[in-house]
Amino acid sequence: MNRLNLQSNHIIEYIIFIIVIFASTSIVTNENIVENDVLLEVDSIQGTVTLSTRAAMSALGLGEDTRTGATATVNLTVNSIKSEGCDSCDSTPVGIHITGNVEIENIRNQMGGLGRVEGELSITYLKEYLDSNFISKEWFTIDWNASGGTELDTFTHIMINHDPPKWELNNRYKAAFVTIDENKESRTGPWLFAHGLVDGVLNIQGCLPDSLSCENSLNPDINLTSTKKSVESPIILPHFNGLVQLTNLESTNTTPEKNQKLRELFKVNNETNIHNILCDENEEDILALKSWEINISNNNIIAPMSLWLDILDLPSSTFIQVNGVWTELDYSNSGCASISDSENNIRLSILNK
């Protein structure tokens, strides 16, 4: 990098970029595809994403002093997975793992300097089924390792506990798209277009949410191509069990900041001394810890990028807000947040570092 100031603690914006990558997978298939009597699944995703919005720039650690418009080139492989060793599961979680190289070029600061960043992106999405269409828990893990140093590296882990279990609707994306000659175009929200090519190859073009420069097919932000392969046995990965229940906690005078943007999505009210949080085992001193009451008259649905996720048939994005407590904690290099309900059951947990 040419002395460009970078930062990488933007969970919400980070997820926006991940959604773009997931688009190529979820539009092609919710599970598998049958073509010429052969069961297929997504094999790879290649292409470019123009980071035309501030949120997209922040997603990969590019700070406020960098101009929008950098280009991320992705070269990713996709595999179905199962996880083993889940401490809190009644059945084996299943999902998808996307991993590969991301290269960001044309990074300019306010003085016009030009730089680039390259790194490895790993995305793991898992869900635990209680029944064929009912999901009890979901996990979303995003690991970004930039080359040339650790200052841009990020790790984000999100766990959602659905009580009652969430009903998963199969093929939900069909209602969100207009189908013309086997091509699919979004009905509402950010423009997204899926065009089938030869041998099952799919080209995805689209616009990032709130993009001012994107002009649909004339100048798309997103231009990704996915290929398919015959269905393979799921890869077995170890389940992430790095979150533990913290006890004997006391509020600090300092307010946590690392998950402030997420806190603003929820209707928190008065501070409380009731602390209920999952976080990673950490020997560092707690720098900031506070809890707030959540009191709502109806079950609000908290879903950053909900329309975008609905269009792309991503079932992991919604959380029904409940009465309870939001607890937030900061260490020097990481932060955690949890929502617990009125019976002290943790319903949402976030770790970022």
Image: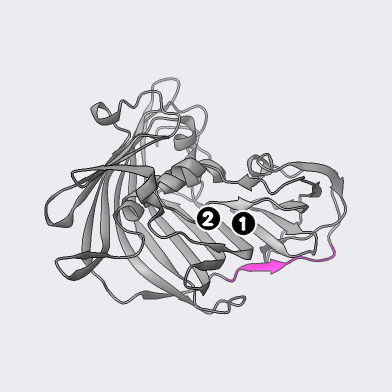
Percent of width and height locating residue 154: 51, 51
Q: Are marks 2 and 1 in contact (CB under 8 Å)?
A: yes
Quarter of the view holding residue 57:
top left
Secondary structure category for the residue under label 1: strand
The magenta stretch is 241-248
- How far apart are the two marked residues, 2 and 1, measured between alpha carbons? 8 Å
Visible residue check, residue 19 = yes
* Viewer-proximal residue among 199 and 48: 199
Secondary structure category for the residue under label 2: strand
Residue lying at 48% horizontally and 41% vertically, measured from the top left: 307
**Badge number at residue 351:** 1
Assess disc 2: are there few (<14), some (14-19) or many (≥20) residues with their C-alpha within 10 Å of its C-alpha. some
The image shows residue 347, relative to residue 54, as above or below, that is: below
Residue lying at 45% horizontally and 47% vertically, measured from the top left: 310
Residue lying at 85% horizontally and 51% vertically, measured from the top left: 251
Which quarter of the rendering shows the N terminus?
A: top left
**In the shown orientation, is residue 183 left or right of residue 233?**
left
The image shows residue 240, relative to residue 187, as above or below, that is: below
**In the shown orientation, is residue 91 left or right of residue 343?**
left
Q: Main secondary structure of the magenta part?
A: loop
Q: Earlier in the sequence, mark 2 or mark 1?
A: 2
Quarter of the view holding residue 248:
bottom right
Percent of width and height locating residue 219: 27, 28
User: Which amino acid type is shown beneath numbered disc 1?
Assistant: Leu
User: Which amino acid type is shown beneath numbered disc 2?
Assistant: Phe
Percent of width and height locating residue 297: 77, 45
Residue lying at 44% horizontally and 34% vertically, measured from the top left: 209
The image shows residue 259, relative to residue 345, as above or below, that is: above
